Image (cartoon, helix red, strand yellow):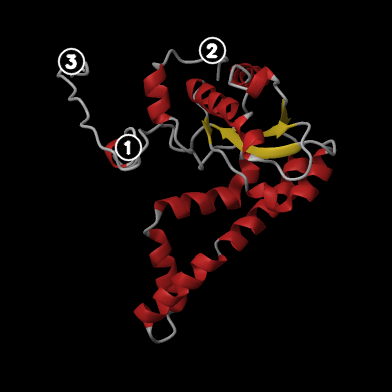
Amino acid sequence: MGMRAQAIDVIDAIYTTGAQRRLRPDAVPDGVVWEILDAAIRGPSGGNDQRWRWLVVTDQAVKDPIAEWYLEAWNSLHRGRRVRLRQVADRLAGRGDRQAAQLEEARKDPNYRAGEHLAINIGRAPVWVFAVVEDVEGTPTVVHGANIFGAVQNLMLAARAHGLGSTLTMLHRQHEAEVAALLGLPDDARALALIPLGYPESGQFFRTRRRPVETVVYWDRWGGQRDRPAVTADGAVAVTR
């Protein structure tokens, strides 16, 4: 794979930079990673303080224990979901065929399947990037997140331009102290996000599916509505006055 990014329309990039949780283990050139991170740091930072640091991990000996903690956190997070699935399975099976019905129910949820695939296989992703914020006392606040997550989105968009899939994850924070010790983070540094990078297993990028924007946007006051202008055949937005 070369280091030159694809010439891609920014809107197309935004619409097709969804979470890619199924990644191939193929190596990613260091030069590509540098290019992606150089794009990431063009993101916004409160007061332009740039208190971010980016820790790239490719060493399998470092990834393996964190991958185990990540899977443990996933299993803990979804234990309640498994209980609900088991209850559904009990109703469906009735005579002890619980596991088969539970698995069948899980298969109907593609997001759950993709998340579980990542939890089991995150260690195979060739590159991990930890988004780290410095000068944090105690628990990170929304301000700390605001100072780095815009840059993380830049990172993911740049990865898309280089043909790489990515996803924003935080389950490593369930084992924050152990991860920080393994990575050698300073006492005032917090790894707010873990972004695995790799070439998508499917080899494709898809337009993200979201609720219609009209159902989640209000105008002037909560609940306030405004009609959305129509789009003409040539893609232009019809202007209303």
User: What residue type is disc 3 on?
Assistant: Asp
Q: Residues within 10 Å of mark 2 (few under 14, many from 20)?
A: few
Which callout, 1 or 3, points to the residue nearer the camera? 1
Residue nearest the observer in this picture, 7 or 40: 40
Distance between the alpha carbons at the discs numbered 3 and 2? 31 Å
Q: Residue at x 66, y 40 (%)?
A: 141
Residue 127 appears in view: no
* Kind of residue at badge 1: Tyr
Near-viewer residue (234 or 100) = 234
* Image coordinates for residue 97, horizontal then vertical, percent: 42, 80
Residue 116: x %, y % from top left: 53, 54
Label 1 secondary element = loop
Mark 1 highlights which residue? 218
What kind of residue is marked 2? Arg
Determine the residue positioned at 56% across, 16% down.
2
The residue identified by callout 3 is 234
Q: Residue furthest bottom?
A: 95
Q: Name the residue carrying label 2.
A: 4
Whole-percent x and y of residue 53? 73, 27
Q: CA distance from mark 2 to mark 1?
A: 41 Å
Say few, some or many: other residues with alpha carbon within 10 Å of mark 3 (under 14 / 14 to 19 / 20 or more): few
Q: Earlier in the sequence, mark 1 or mark 3?
A: 1
Secondary structure, mark 2, is loop
Q: What distance separates the C-alpha of mark 1 from that of mark 3? A: 27 Å
Disc 1 and disc 3 in contact, CB within 8 angstroms = no
| Quadrant of the image occupied by residue 185 | top right
